[in-house]
Amino acid sequence: MSAEWVTAIATAGTFLVIAASAIAALIQLRHMRGSNQIVALTECRETLESPEFREAQRFVSYELPKRLEDPVERRRIAQPQSQFEGEYKAIDTVANFFESMGMFVKNRIVDPQLALSMWCYVVLRNWNSLLPIITYVRDDLREPAIWEHFEYLAAISQQYLERNQGKGYPRGIPRMREDRSFIEAVKADARVG
C-alpha cells in the first residue's frame, strides 16, 4: 500500500473519530439541558408549593382585589416609600417569581409547552390579580419593561389556553366517571343554610 493510501485511510479514520466525538458531545449536551430543565422545573414547583409562596399567592389572588376597591388601601399602596412592605410584600414575591419563570421559559431553559401545561392557570390568575398594580408601577416609574417576562408568560399562557381548551386530554382514552356527590351536597347545604 502506498503512503498516499495510508494517509487517506488515516485521515478518514480521524474524521470518523471526530464525527463520533461531535455526535457524542451533542447527545451529552441534550442530556445536560434535560437535567438543567428538571432542576429548574423542580425549583419552580417547590417554590409554588412552599407555604410562604402559597400565602403570597392567596393574598395576591383573593385579598388584593378586595383591597384595591378601598380608597385608603389604594393610597397606602401608592405611597412610594412603603409601596410593597408588610403584607404587600406578597406583590413583589409573586411578580418576581413569575418574572423569573417567564425568563426561563422565554430562553427555553424550561420547555414552554411543559411549563404552560402545568402552570398556565396559575400564571393567569396571578397576572390578572396583579395587573392593576403592574400597570400602576410601570406608569409611575415610566418603565414599561417592569415584569415583562411575567407579561410574556401570561400572554403565552392565554394563547395556550385558547389553543388547547378542552384538548389537553389524549384522544382515544376514555374519561373516568364523575362523582357529583360533593357538588350535590354543597347545593343542598346552600338551600338549607
Image (cartoon, rainbow, N blue to C red):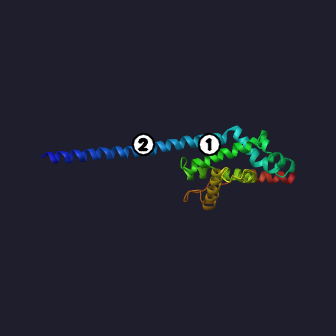
Residue 4 location (% of width, % of height) = 16, 47
The count of marks equals: 2
Horizontal side, residue 45 vs residue 131: left or right:
left
Residue that appears at 57% across and 42% down = 40
Quote the CA–CA distance across marks 2 and 1: 26 Å
Q: Is residue 166 visible?
A: no
Q: Residues within 10 Å of mark 1 (few under 14, many from 20)?
A: few
Three-letter amino acid code of the residue under disc 2: Gln
Q: Earlier in the sequence, mark 2 or mark 1?
A: 2
Element type where label 1 sits in the image: helix
- Is residue 28 something one can see in this rendering? yes
State the image quarter where residue 177 is shown. bottom right
Residue at 57% x, 50% y: name it. Answer: 105
Q: Which residue is mark 1?
A: 45
The extreme front residue here reads 142
Q: Mark 2 against mark 1, which lies toward the viewer?
A: 2
Asked whether 166 or 87 is in front, the reply is 87
Q: Which residue is at the front of the view, 183 or 142?
A: 142
Q: Position of residue 13 (x, y in %)?
A: 25, 45
Callout 1 amino acid: Arg
Q: Which residue is mark 2?
A: 28
Badge 2: residue crowd in 10 Å (few <14, some 14–19, many ≥20): few
Q: Residue at x 55, y 47 (%)?
A: 110
Q: Position of residue 38 (x, y in %)?
A: 54, 42
- Residue 33 image label: none
Residue 28 in which image quadrant: top left
Q: Are marks 2 and 1 in contact (CB under 8 Å)?
A: no
Q: Where residue 1 sits in the image (x, y, percent)?
A: 12, 46
